Amino acid sequence: MKNQYTCCPWTLCLHTDLQGWECLDLINCGTAPDHFKNQHGITNMSREVELVCVWQGCGCQVTRHNYVRHVREHHLGHDRVSAHTSQPALWPEGESCSHRGGEGNMTAVESEGAGCDGAT
C-alpha cells in the first residue's frame, strides 16, 4: 500500500547549520521525518518545544510537533489538498513513480496534475 508521500519529488535539503552551510542531502516528503531526526537532531523533545526553522532564508518559529509539516508545505511544496500538482519532480537514478512511468535519473519531470498519491 502506497502512502501519500510515495511519489513526492526529491529536492536538496537546505537546512543551514551554525556555520551557514546547507545540508544538501536529497530528501522528499516521505524521507523528511527520519532525515530531520537523524541528521538535524529534531528528536527526543516535547512536541510543544518552539523551534526556529533554519531552512535557507526561513526563520519561522514552529512547534516541534508541526516542524515536519512546515518543511513539507513551505519548503518541499507539498500542499495538503493538491500535493505537488505544479512542482517539477526529481527522481534519483533507478527510481520512478508508477503513475508517471519510466526510470528516473535526476531529471525534472512535470507532475502532469497528479498529486503524490497519483490522484489528479
Image (spheres, rainbow, N blue to C red):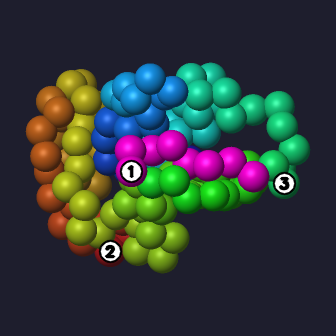
Residue 40 lies in the magenta stretch: no
Q: Is residue 120 above or below residue 68?
A: below
53 sits to left or right of 84: right
Kindly report the distance in space between the C-alpha atoms of the residues bearing marks 3 and 1: 23 Å
In this rendering, the label closer to the viewer, 1 or 2:
1
Disc number for residue 48: 3
Q: What numbered label is drawn on residue 57?
A: 1
Q: Nearer the viewer, mark 3 or mark 2?
A: 3
Task: Give percent across and percent down for residue 19.
Answer: 44, 23
**Residue at position x 34%, y 63% in the image:** 84
Residue 120 shows which numbered tag?
2
Task: Identify the secondary structure beneath mark 1.
Answer: loop
Q: CA distance from mark 1 to mark 2?
A: 32 Å
**Which residue corresponds to the image point at 13% horizontal and 46% vertical from the top-left?**
108
Left or right: residue 53 compared with residue 44: left
Residue 26 seen from this side: no
- Identify the secondary structure beneath mark 2: loop
Give the farthest residue toward the right: 46
Say if 70 sits above or below 80 in the image.
Answer: above
Bin the neighbour count of mark 3 within 10 Å (Cα to Cα): few under 14, some 14-19, many 20 and up. few
Q: Earlier in the sequence, mark 3 or mark 1?
A: 3
Magenta residues, as a range?
Answer: 50-57
For the stretch drawn in magenta, what is the main secondary structure? loop
Give the quarter of the image for residue 33: top right
Q: Residue furthest front?
A: 19
Report x, y in % for residue 87.
25, 61
SS at circle 3? loop
Report x, y in % for residue 27: 41, 36
